[in-house]
Image (cartoon, helix red, strand yellow):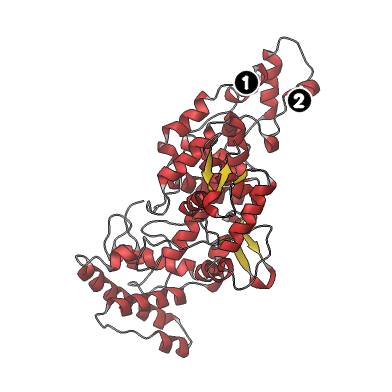
């Protein structure tokens, strides 16, 4: 995406040509995989393995969406199997149940839902999300990941035949017109993610059973952190994500309620406004590369450029709103102040952006947060609202990638490793998780103190 200039932004928003003012989004860079149209929004109601399959394809340089012609595959099988079998028998023997996948190699051919109009509309959002994940997790430059889908050995002749039937009968197109995003590299620790990924790739069954959960969690973590840090004065400071255990009962005094998803949910109500504010500030700062709010307001060498541009831009923005709005109360609330104070000018700009965005558009954009419920990382707790939620599956996933095979780790060290991945538990939740570990017989308890409790590998 070519960088937009200040004058181009003014023209695009109709601030200089006496036309109706326009609300423009993602003019410098796009930082969220969200849309302002409902049909394009990913609902997370379909199997996330579909997204994983799209991620696999795009990461190795192929179009994320493919069409599978089953009849062509069965014709291939019929021609290449010595014992002639009728079509019904072929389908019974060689039908691939993608809902119960056994061979990681076949993620490359995971079918994409693209039949109904609703599915076709949502596919646009899925393709954007795919590109976002590939760039976020750097999978397109991860040779170990890419080679995994080339060098996976088949276990038997049956797997070899199935693979060949797909390989020879599906057209693999190169990626065209994919979305472009800016990813803040400091949010996710790539070394930790790659270590987790490497453990999954060490075993085919573990990979198939867990890759969807691993990728969806890191996506979830990044979106939550970016939403929180977007307008923070210290972008490097993470939001403490306190999780409750899925099976436990909680009260309003718990950290997972007081310092949990509720804070993020409130911030997300203005997500499109804050997204546009940071986007416009990057243009007004005349940045070639996208920068965080924190970086821009603390860059003393660039403050004169940003200060000059924002005062001029705010004046044009205000005059355009004044000419278009009919409610004198709203106009009076907006006002315009040419004071040379950056904080005041940024506050003005944010209020103009919010006034200029249709409320329904703003609501649709942040609706993606509601869809996260389907990923199981948040849970509705009645009158307490939503909290970050750690299911048994999530706990087992990170226990398996943290504790080395056939080894054990101190319980307190295990919880530290969870925190490195953004998952914090208060003391009560830790006790509940210890009970869970005891129930599946992986806790080695030398005493009741945490210093003498070990968690054994489950691999």
- Point out the residue furthest to the top here: 82
User: Who is closer to the viewer here, 439 or 326?
Assistant: 439
Name the residue that disc number 2 marks. 91
Measure how far apart labels 2 and 1 are at the Cα level: 21 Å
Please give the label number shown on residue 278.
none
Q: Residue furthest front?
A: 447
Q: Give the camera-side residue of 336 and 20.
A: 336
What percent of the width, then of the height, locates residue 51?
57, 44
Q: Measured along the vertical axis of the image, is residue 1 above or below residue 209?
A: below
Residue 77: quadrant of the picture: top right
> Height in image: 152 above or below 254?
above
Q: Percent x, y for residue 331?
A: 42, 86
Position of 287 with respect to 438 (left or right) is: left
**Mark 2 crowd level (few <14, some 14–19, many ≥20, 10 Å Cα):** some
Mark closer to the observer (2, 1): 1
Name the residue that disc number 1 marks: 155
> Residue 224: percent from the left, percent from the top?
50, 60
Residue 396 occupies which quadrant of the picture? top right
In the image, what residue occupies the spot 51% across and 57% down? 34
Instruction: Give SS at disc 2.
Output: helix
Please report the residue visible at 63 percent of the width from the left and 32 percent of the height from the top.
Answer: 68
Residues packed near mark 1 inside 10 Å, few (<14), some (14 to 19) or many (20 plus): few
| Mark 2 / mark 1, whichever is N-terminal | 2
């Amino acid at each position: 995406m070519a960088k937009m200039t200040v004058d181009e932004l003014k023209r695009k928003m109709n601030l200089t040509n006496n036309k109706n003012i326009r609300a423009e989004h993602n003019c410098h860079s796009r930082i969220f995989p969200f849309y302002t149209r409902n049909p394009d929004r990913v609902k997370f109601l379909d199997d996330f393995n579909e997204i994983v399959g799209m991620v696999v394809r795009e990461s190795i340089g192929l179009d994320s969406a493919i069409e599978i012609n089953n009849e062509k595959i069965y014709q291939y099988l019929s021609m290449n199997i010595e014992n002639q079998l009728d079509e019904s028998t072929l389908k019974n023997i060689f039908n691939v149940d993608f809902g119960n996948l056994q061979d990681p190699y076949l993620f490359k051919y995971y079918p994409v839902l693209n039949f109904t109009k609703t599915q076709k509309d949502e596919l646009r959002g899925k393709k954007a999300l795919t590109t976002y994940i590939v760039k976020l997790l750097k999978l397109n430059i991860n040779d170990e990941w890419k080679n995994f889908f080339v060098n996976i050995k088949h276990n038997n002749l049956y797997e070899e035949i199935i693979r060949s039937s797909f390989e020879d009968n599906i057209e693999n197109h190169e990626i065209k017109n994919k979305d472009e995003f800016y990813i803040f590299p400091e949010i996710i620790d790539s070394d930790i993610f790659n270590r987790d990924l490497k453990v999954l790739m060490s075993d085919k069954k573990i990979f198939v059973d867990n890759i969807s959960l691993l990728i969806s969690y890191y996506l979830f973590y990044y979106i939550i952190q970016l939403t929180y840090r977007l307008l923070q004065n210290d972008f490097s400071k993470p939001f403490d994500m306190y999780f409750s255990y899925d099976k436990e009962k909680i009260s309003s005094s718990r950290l997972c309620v007081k310092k949990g998803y509720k804070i993020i949910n409130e911030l997300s109500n203005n997500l499109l406004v804050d997204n546009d504010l940071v986007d416009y500030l990057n243009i007004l700062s005349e940045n070639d590369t996208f920068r965080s709010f924190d970086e821009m307001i603390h860059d003393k060498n660039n403050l004169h450029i940003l200060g000059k541009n924002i005062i001029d831009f705010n004046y044009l923005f205000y005059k355009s709103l004044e000419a278009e709005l009919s409610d004198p109360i709203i106009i009076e609330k907006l006002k315009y102040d040419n004071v040379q104070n950056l904080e005041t000018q940024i506050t003005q700009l944010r209020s103009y952006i919010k006034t200029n965005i249709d409320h329904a558009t703003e609501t649709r954009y942040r609706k993606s947060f509601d869809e996260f419920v389907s990923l199981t990382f948040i849970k509705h707790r009645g009158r307490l609202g939503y909290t970050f939620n750690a299911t048994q599956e999530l706990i087992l996933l990170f226990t398996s990638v943290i504790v080395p095979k056939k080894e054990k780790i101190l319980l307190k060290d295990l919880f530290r490793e969870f925190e490195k991945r953004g998952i914090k538990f208060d003391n009560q939740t830790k006790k509940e998780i210890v009970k869970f570990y005891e129930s599946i017989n992986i806790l080695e308890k030398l005493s009741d103190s945490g210093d003498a409790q070990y968690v054994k590998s489950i691999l």
